[in-house]
Image (cartoon, rainbow, N blue to C red):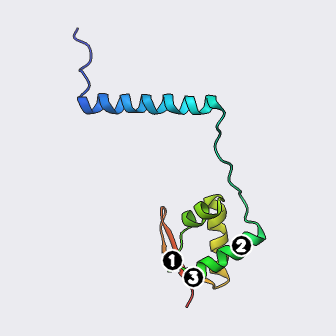
Amino acid sequence: MGGGKKPTLSAAEKRQLKMLQREALKKIREKGEEKKVRLDYIPKDIEKQILNDVKKSKFVTPQMIALKYDIKVSAALRFLKELVDKKVLETVIWSSRVKVFKAAA
């Protein structure tokens, strides 16, 4: 008897927003627009550009490099770890979510 309680306005609004997003995603997929494929390795010419940018900037994160050079974040992180091993970079912050590096002094 009675059934479940009615959803609150905010819950109903969230549900409706998710449905609209799903529909928009379906339309995009139907049009043939696919996700952009990012490289999972860093070509040698891009390595040199990244190295120059890293030396010029105050700090750098793997996400910054991945967006700028259209590579995967994991590949960018791997490259930055190599630079830390070579003493080109220093680690400023290393947590599960954020990795921040700066040029070695």
Q: Does the residue at mark 3 contact the one at mark 1 (Cβ under 8 Å)?
A: no
Q: Residue type at mark 1?
A: Phe
Between the C-alphas of marks 3 and 1, the distance is: 9 Å
Q: CA distance from mark 1 to mark 2?
A: 17 Å
4 and 43: which is toward the camera: 43
Disc 1 element:
loop
Describe residue 32's horizontal placement relative to residue 63 as left or right.
right
Q: Quadrant of the C terminus?
A: bottom right
Residue 31: percent from the left, percent from the top? 63, 30
User: Which quadrant holds the N terminus?
Assistant: top left
Q: Quadrant of residue 45?
A: bottom right
| Residue 53 location, quadrant | bottom right
Q: Residue at x 64, y 65 (%)?
A: 76
Foreground of the two, 46 or 9? 46
**Residue sticking out furthest to the right:** 44
Whether residue 29 is visible here, answered yes or no, is: yes
* Residue at the disc numbered 2: 47
Q: Residues within 10 Å of mark 3 (few under 14, many from 20)?
A: few
Q: Amino acid at mark 3?
A: Lys
Q: Nearer the viewer, mark 3 or mark 1?
A: 3
Q: Is residue 53 left or right of residue 43?
A: left
Badge 3 is on which residue?
Answer: 56
- Which numbered disc covers residue 59? 1
Task: Tell me the residue at 60%/83% (across/down).
Answer: 55
Mark 2 and mark 3: span between their CA atoms? 14 Å
Marks 2 and 3: CB-CB under 8 Å? no
Coordinates of residue 27 in the picture (x, y in percent): 56, 29
Give the percent coordinates (x, y) of residue 95. 47, 67
Sequence-wise first label, 2 or 3: 2
